[in-house]
Amino acid sequence: MKRCRVCGSSGIIYDRNNIKAGSQGELKVCQCIEKQCTCGGIEPYQVFDGNGNHSWCSCRGTRMKLNTVKKAFKESQIPSKYKWKFREDFEINHPTANKIIGFVDTIRDKKPNEKWKDGFYLWGQAGSGKTLLASIFLQELILKYAQSGKFVDLSRQFFSRLKRSYDNTDELYGTGGQILDELINVPFLVIDDFGVQRNTDWESEMLYNLIDSRYAEERVTIITSNLNISEYKKVAMGRVYSRILEMCKIVHIDLPDYREKFSNQI
């Protein structure tokens, strides 16, 4: 079957022009699938011949996958500011930006059965677009592979939830293992604001367990930070430093302040 240039043969696209489902656009099956469909997109996606015998429509697998993708986006915990942002939403003519967008194009060009293994450590000054780029990576991967992805902000989510799980008066008490397992096992993970932790022994150990486990399972991890990766050699995080070097491409985001431009788009 010839590869579709619109969806990269994944069969699913994000239609930002269709606002029937809400102001953010709509996830839908690509026209390359619709053209082959003979069931009209009606569940359970089956067709009947002249003798009343039924068979599954060729669109069924993709429509079932679409439900999985919608669920993954709903559960991704991507901040609303960065939700539904894709390759087309990072418009800046700069060598670093072009390099990053080249990685996104590579994701799109992959065949659906070709696994994506590369993680990224995106570092640079505040406002350079690191979190936006990480969110774009995450959403492109979810869309391409129809697998779950999570966004976790170290400054607000990770450690606060873990600490609450040790408080016997809190509703999260006893869920620390579950919280870690969820982040360890999710296929795609963004860790935002890496380096904001206080580097206590406990925080360093929790971070190492998370990153080392994802490294061992070859899970895709995308990290943003204001710090050059070499800074971690100077503190008690040498083990984390070595793991990040092995599992991530290190990319310095040396872009002009992108925050003001982005804020005008939403």
Image: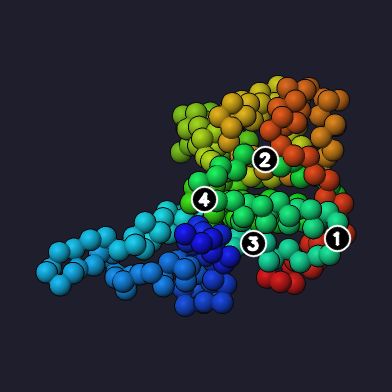
| Left or right of residue 264, residue 72 in this image | left
Q: Residue at x 55, y 29 (%)?
A: 217
- On the image, numbered disc 1 is attached to which residue? 94
The Cα atoms of the two marked residues, 3 and 1, are separated by 18 Å
Report the mark closest to the observer, 1 or 4: 4
| Left or right of residue 90, residue 124 in this image | right
Residue 193 in sight here: no
Task: Tell me if mark 2 has few (under 14), some (14-19) or many (20+) residues whose alpha carbon lies within 10 angstroms of its own.
Answer: many
Q: Residue reaching furthest front? A: 1
- On the image, numbered disc 3 is attached to which residue? 86
Task: Tell me if mark 4 has few (under 14), some (14-19) or many (20+) residues whose alpha carbon lies within 10 angstroms of its own.
Answer: some
Decide which of tag 3 and tag 2 comes sooner along the chain.
Answer: 3
Q: Residue at x 18, y 63 (%)?
A: 54
Report the mark closest to the observer, 2 or 4: 4
Q: Which mark is residue 112?
A: 4
Pick the front one: 113 or 96: 113
Q: What amino acid is found at the position of numbered circle 3 in the picture?
A: Phe
Q: What is the secondary structure assignment of the residue under circle 2?
A: strand
Vertical arrangement, residue 88 with respect to residue 97, above or below = below
- On the image, numbered disc 2 is attached to which residue? 119
